[in-house]
Image (cartoon, rainbow, N blue to C red):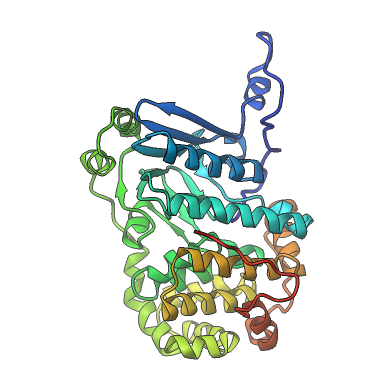
Amino acid sequence: MTEPAGTAAPASASAPAASPAASPAAAASAEPPLLVRREGAITRITMNRPRAINAFNREMADAMCAALAEAARDGSTAVLLDGAGERGFCGGGDVKLLSSDPVVGLEFLRREYEADYAVGSSPVPVVGIMHGITMGGGIGLTGHAALRVVTETSVLAMPEVRIGIAPDVGGHLLLARAPGRLGELLAITAGSMTAGDAIALGFADRLVPSERIAALADRLASGESPARVVEGLASTPPAAPLAAAREWFDPIAEAALGDAGSVMADPAAAAVRLLAELEASDRAEARAAAETARGMNPVSIAVTLAQLARTRALGLDLAAVLGDDLRVLGRMIGHPNFVEGVRAQLVDKDSSPRWTPARVEDVDAAEVAAILDPRDLPGERPLVLG
């Protein structure tokens, strides 16, 4: 649910309307952070914090849930979900809130996951437009939609291990379903995907060029079938360079990780084996991946590998994965590593986090096991969906 660095304060939905003499910036601040309107046959929902790459907050999550419920009642034939501005659909969730106030942050996570589930379970098909930067919480909203559209500008990522937590918003469900072991590669390196990668790895369905998005909206509003509209406007996706990494990464990961049971039994040891195999490889790409992973939070890497293994082994659905996410993130956001990750990436922006421990070899297996415990501990309130 990574929020981009340098984001602006949330726009207030309760701000007074701008006067005719107000500046453009003042007028923009008067708009709600989530725009919901009926356009012909559809409901259109637009993330509206462009200065913050539409970073998702509690107010937006509440409005998203309400808008999707209303679309299911009012006869809308589709929901079009997009983002304001040229920079991207959504750069992530409000991680600064999580690091500064874990109690309030946990309630935001709960509502965010409810919004993700509302998108994924909507009886009205949701068409998500992942233009530009779509990271963390942005993938939670669009990655579970009925029709997931990328454009030539799309850059997708689940970079949570970079800030000391683990992929959430149902993202590790998508990672677990990626071909071969590419989910592990993407997760431990906080890697990014092009439009072609996103389609090849199962994070998106079709590429629609940005100049055709307006036509897509118009045709949906006219009542045409969402699937027919998207298919009719889609173009052949570009190459998927990340997908080609299966050639060298899959054999290494299979040898190091083994089956799901082995990873789940001792995720920290599995992480050590994977990095050792990558570093010992004669492939430069493998050694580079290990070097990148060494900069991520070691505990996060172990937790993430276990989450992917558990999701695959048990065949978890979106509701179950989001329930896991709330337990795991609730236990990680109060850890000093998360505060340090946010400091390094979003506050001081020195990109030099001081992790505890600093190496995956020193990760405490008992600490990882406590984070991953699937039981609700005293004081924890489960996420009930559906």
Left or right: 252 as drawn, with respect to 114: left
Say which quarter of the image contains residue 2: bottom right
Total marks shown come to: 0
Of 54 and 295, nearer the camera is: 54
Name the outermost residue toward the front: 73
Left or right, 50 with respect to 5, comes to left
Q: Is residue 65 visible?
A: yes
Point out the image quarter for the N terminus: bottom right
Relative vertical location of residue 308 with respect to residue 99 in this rendering, above or below: below
Q: Give percent across and percent down for residue 227.
A: 26, 44
Of the pair 237 and 65, the residue shown nearer to us: 65
Residue 48's place in the image compared with 293, above or below, is above
In this rendering, would 299 be left or right of 314?
right
Residue at image point 77% right, 68% down? 336
Question: Which percent across, then down, holds residue 295?
Answer: 62, 70
Query: Where, by quadrant of the figure, is residue 22 drawn?
Result: top right
Q: Whole-percent x and y of residue 108? A: 67, 53
Along the line of sight, the residue nearer the viewer: 4 or 38: 38
* Residue 35 drawn at (x, y percent): 54, 31
Query: At 29% from the left edge and 27% from the top edge, which residue is drawn?
Result: 222
Q: Is residue 146 above or below residue 48?
A: below
Task: State whether residue 55 appears in this view.
Answer: no
